[in-house]
């Protein structure tokens, strides 16, 4: 099984904490995960050290930025 988590929020809050905690817990069970974060998001660097987790950062102007679909 593979899971992709796309989180384009800029700030750290409850939903972001739950999402990243879930990534940490799921990684313990051998599930491959792709975590897509906004460049400006200050957390998540430690996720790349987890087994089966790939972290990608993309330029996004806002939480629902359709332009982030296209490379700059």
Image (cartoon, rainbow, N blue to C red):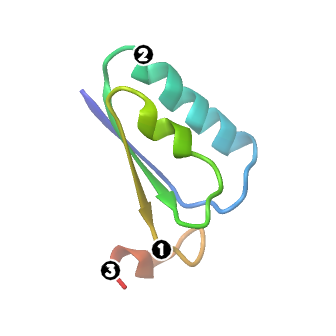
Q: Earlier in the sequence, mark 3 or mark 2?
A: 2
Secondary structure state at the residue bearing disc 2: loop
Which x, y percent locates residue 68? 42, 76
Q: Which residue of the protein is positioned furthest toward the right in this rendering?
A: 13
Secondary structure state at the residue bearing disc 3: loop
Q: Give the residue drawn at x 43%, y 29%.
A: 50
The quadrant holding residue 66 is: bottom left
Q: CA distance from mark 3 to mark 1?
A: 8 Å
Q: CA distance from mark 3 to mark 2?
A: 33 Å
Secondary structure state at the residue bearing disc 1: loop
* Residue highlighted by disc 2: 28
Q: Earlier in the sequence, mark 1 or mark 2?
A: 2
Judge whether 61 appears above or below 32 on screen: below
Which x, y percent locates residue 47? 49, 37
Q: CA distance from mark 1 to mark 2?
A: 29 Å
Check disc 3: other Cα within 10 Å, few if <14, some if 14-19, many if 20+: few
Considering depth in this image, is 6 or 59 the residue closer to the camera?
A: 59
* Residue highlighted by disc 3: 71
């Amino acid at each position: 099984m593979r899971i992709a988590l796309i989180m384009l929020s800029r700030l750290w809050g409850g939903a972001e904490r739950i999402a990243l905690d879930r990534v940490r817990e799921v990684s313990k069970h051998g599930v491959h995960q792709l975590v897509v974060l906004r460049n400006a998001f200050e957390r998540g660097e430690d996720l790349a050290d987890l087994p089966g987790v790939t972290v990608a950062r993309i330029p996004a102007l806002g939480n629902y930025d359709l332009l982030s679909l296209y490379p700059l």
